[in-house]
Amino acid sequence: MEEISKKIGAEEFISFPDGVFRVLLPTPVQEILFTFSEAEWRDFTSTLQEAYYMREVYQIIN
């Protein structure tokens, strides 16, 4: 989550050969690198933020 938080607002979209701009997200495994289009990145980060808020709510309830 920390790596993703660093990228939000400071994304560097790179043009791929298919003409789509994507952001790269490295993983702890060097051979695996995720790529997201602008719309996918927006959905991904939004979903992560919602999950974080729900976890906070569950911690308050329990």
Image: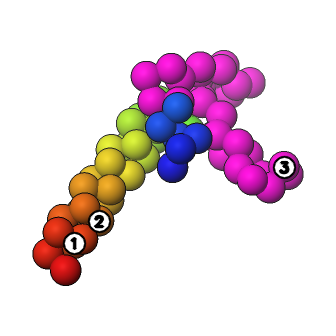
* Residue 43, image x, y percentages: 37, 44
Mark number, residue 16? none
Looking at the picture, tell me which residue is in the foreground, 53 or 46.
Answer: 53
Which quarter of the picture shows residue 62? bottom left
Q: Single out the residue that lies furthest toward the bottom.
A: 62
Instruction: Work out how far the residue at label 3 is from the one at label 2, CA to CA, in angstroms.
Output: 29 Å
Sequence order check, earlier mark of 3 and 2 = 3
The residue mark sitting in front, 3 or 1, is 1
Q: Relative to 2, is 43 on the left or the right? A: left
Residue 47 visible in the picture? no
Tell me if residue 25 is in the magenta stretch: yes
- Residue bearing mark 3: 30
Question: Residue at (32%, 48%) from the top-left corner?
Answer: 49
Question: Residue at (42%, 47%) from the top-left corner?
Answer: 44
Tell me if residue 14 is in the magenta stretch: yes
Q: Relative to 34, is 39 on the left or the right? A: left
- Residue bearing mark 1: 58
Residue 41 visible in the picture? yes
Q: Single out the residue that lies furthest toward the right.
A: 31
Picture mark count: 3
Looking at the picture, tell me which residue is in the foreground, 35 or 52.
Answer: 52
Q: Which amino acid does the dot numbered 1 rest on? A: Tyr
The residue stretch that appears in magenta:
7-35
Describe the element under mark 3 as helix, strand or loop.
loop
Q: Which amino acid does the dot numbered 3 rest on? A: Gln
- Residue bearing mark 2: 55
* Residue 48, image x, y percentages: 38, 52
